[in-house]
Image (cartoon, grey):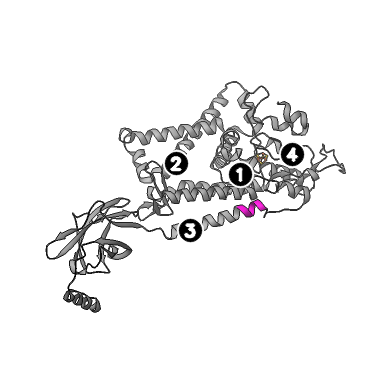
Amino acid sequence: MSESNAENDPGESFRDSLGIVEKSGKRKWVYPKEPKGRFTNARNAFSAVLLLILFGTPFVTVDGHPFMLFDIINRQFILFGFAFGPHDFFLLGLSMITTIVFIFLFTAIFGRLFCGWICPQTVFLESVFRKIDYWIEGDHKDQRRLNESGWTGEKTLKKSTKYLVYFLISFLTANMLLAWVIGIEPLKKIVTEPVDSHFAGFTAMMLFTGLFYWIFIWFREQACILVCPYGRLQGVLLDPNSIVIAYDYLRGEPRGKMKRNEVRASGDCIDCNECVVVCPTGIDIRNGTQLECVNCTACIDACDTVMDKINKPRGLIRYDSLNGIKTQIRKIFTTRVIGYSVVQVLLLTLLTFFLMTRSEIDVTILRSPGMFYQEQQNDQVSNLYDMKVLNKTFVQRDIQVKLLNIKGEIKILGDNKSVPPQEAALTKMFVMLDKKSITAMNTPLLFAVYSNGKEIQRISTSFLGPVEKKTKHDEKEHDDERREK
Ligand code: SF4
Ligand code: SF4
């Protein structure tokens, strides 16, 4: 224990140690009692929905393509059926900033609600793997007894069954993760075809299986307490108005054991320790909000059960803010929350605007660099242009270009008018104009770009040409032509 907190304030000494570490510095294995109650039931149901989404989404396709895909290796993403690639890098950056501000805003109001209800680590650990522990090894006391006992037939059977089930779930989870990254069809090939045909994919699958197995069989709650950056940021993200899982010390203190038929004059906490024995991170929430608390709600259920038994109102431990407990006044819209909300609305507006105006095909037409005009036969002048087409869709696109504002001819060089899905193509093309239609050194051009027969974009550029001295007859002819148009 450091001299700091303990000496200055003995009531704060719990902050100098971790609930999962012995005084000697060794890890203290946590055997939480199985929680039961309305919050646990709600969390189990919610976890089931999340797991269904997590494992089911990779099977959902739109027009033969994944509904969601996070192919970080090839920098290709599909969100809700829409493809995004490296060209959408600014959208990715903007989305990340928006997400970070949202996390700040959400945490300032709701504390670590995400950790308890949505975080995959908590969902898997508390709603999947810990359930397997209870199912195979029994409740917390049985688990401790089994671990501390020597190797018997029963222990060998229970442990080997547990390790096998853990491995199978880790393997399934690794498959699910890969399906989110590479898609379900490539995954099926890795699973069904010989290993040497997909060695890299198979290696990734086994590495992830090993990682998940190690996290859930051994590392467990340490991921939240020692590694997770979100958990460690709580000290700056929370304030006294944030909603956390809190013990109502005004109602609970002074705590004390309850005697049979006692008419209680002290606080409502009967010091039964039930809220401590169910805690998966080994802390006592009555000490106050702590870094280790993952908002799993187990202590709320445990304490509510106790309150029911002693005929006291539920909610001695509940979702509340520190100010809410102290003053009974709950304030959500603090200056900080209003500030985050304003930034969040601005970012969301910007992101929505960019998403709504994002085109599926981007075309640019520019005069080829370093090229001047070329005098052609039949009194024509030509300029060479580079047309770059970026096809962000999943289908091949044919591109056609027309001149809108002037009579002229477009000659595409080669046959590169069709752009494969998710690719960019560069096409060279000549624009030929009659000399007499050139009245200035720089003639403005307006192109209409068509894809599969539908106009998708208009592009303005300019045409370089010689300006010749015109005879009166030429000028009259030119004026007549313009009038006709
Ligand atoms: S479960 Fe409730 S009554 Fe029991 S020790 Fe915890 S806070 Fe006190
Ligand atoms: S203090 Fe309560 S909510 Fe926090 S981790 Fe422990 S049991 Fe879960």
In this view, the residue in front, 213 or 310, is: 213
- Which of pointers 1 and 3 lies earlier in the amino acid sequence? 1
* Image quarter of residue 198: top left
Above or below, comparing residue 453 to residue 276 in the picture: below
Helix, strand or loop status at disc 1: helix
In the rendered image, which residue does mark 2 sit on?
A: 177
Ligand 2 neighbours mark 1 (CB distance < 8 Å): yes
Amino acid type shown at disc 2? Leu
Above or below, comparing residue 106 to residue 7 in the picture: below
Q: Which residues are magenta?
A: 334-339
The reply to whether residue 314 is in sight is: no
Label 4, label 3: how many angstroms apart (C-alpha)?
44 Å
Ligand 1 neighbours mark 4 (CB distance < 8 Å): yes
Residue drawn at the location 59% of the way across and 46% of the way down = 114
Helix, strand or loop status at disc 4: helix
- Which of pointers 4 and 3 lies earlier in the amino acid sequence? 4
